[in-house]
Amino acid sequence: VMLDSPEDDPHPYVYSHVLQIFHANVALRGEDFRPMEFIWVRWYRRDARYRAGWKHKRLHRVEFVPHDEPGAFGFLDPADVVRGVHLIPQFRYGRTDAALPRSMARSFDDAEDDMDWRCFCRFVDRDMVMRYHDDAIGH
């Protein structure tokens, strides 16, 4: 999924991989329970060294934040999600099993591994194209 980026980031969005969606009834001590929804994510980071964008005629690429770095995982309010993203694996750069060892966040077979890099496709539909275009109306 993609979210609006912090104001100090020149790229308009940040990206994450949804690990799980939670629906919970929560309460503070002495208060009534209330429903709460939140999303557990693993963050991607954009490769700032990779020349991409309209000027370079290349899609931006992302990789997972290494699992041992602070902030590699997080929780989101579903209202903060802008929309889903179509990621294209870059097979050219190979696969890795170093991104995340077997854990709660990685429950598939040990034989499977992650792509080193993925590109996010801004051309998946016209709404997505307009989100990356400076002169877009209403985006």
Image: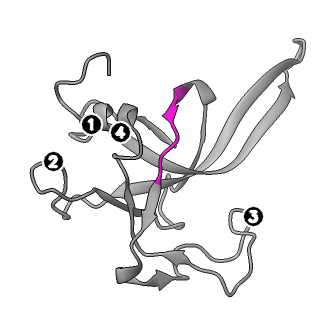
Measuring 74% from the left and 29% from the top, which residue is drawn there? 37
Label 1, label 3: how many angstroms apart (C-alpha)?
34 Å
Q: Mark 1 points at which residue?
A: 132
Label 2, label 4: how many angstroms apart (C-alpha)?
15 Å
Q: Which of marks 4 and 3 is nearer the N terminus?
A: 4
Q: Where is residue 112 in the image (x, y as percent from the top left)?
A: 65, 81
User: Which of labels 2 and 4 is toward the front?
Assistant: 2
Residue sitting at the far top: 31
Part of the protein shown in magenta: 80-86
Mark 2 secondary-structure assignment: loop
Measuring 32% from the left and 32% from the top, which residue is drawn there? 131
Q: Mark 2 points at which residue?
A: 54
Q: Which of marks 1 and 4 is nearer the N terminus?
A: 4
Q: Position of residue 135 (x, y in %)?
A: 17, 24
User: Which of labels 3 and 2 is toward the front?
Assistant: 2
Mark 4 secondary-structure assignment: strand
Label annotation for residue 104: 3
Residue sitting at the far bottom: 111
- Left or right of 81? Residue 13 is left
Residue sitting at the far left: 55
Measuring 19% from the left and 51% from the top, which residue is drawn there? 53
Residue 5 belongs to magenta span: no
Q: Can residue 64 be seen in this view?
A: no
- Left or right of 19? Residue 132 is left
Q: Name the residue under label 4.
A: 13
Q: Which of marks 2 and 1 is nearer the N terminus?
A: 2
Mark 3 secondary-structure assignment: loop
Q: What residue type is labelled 3?
A: Met
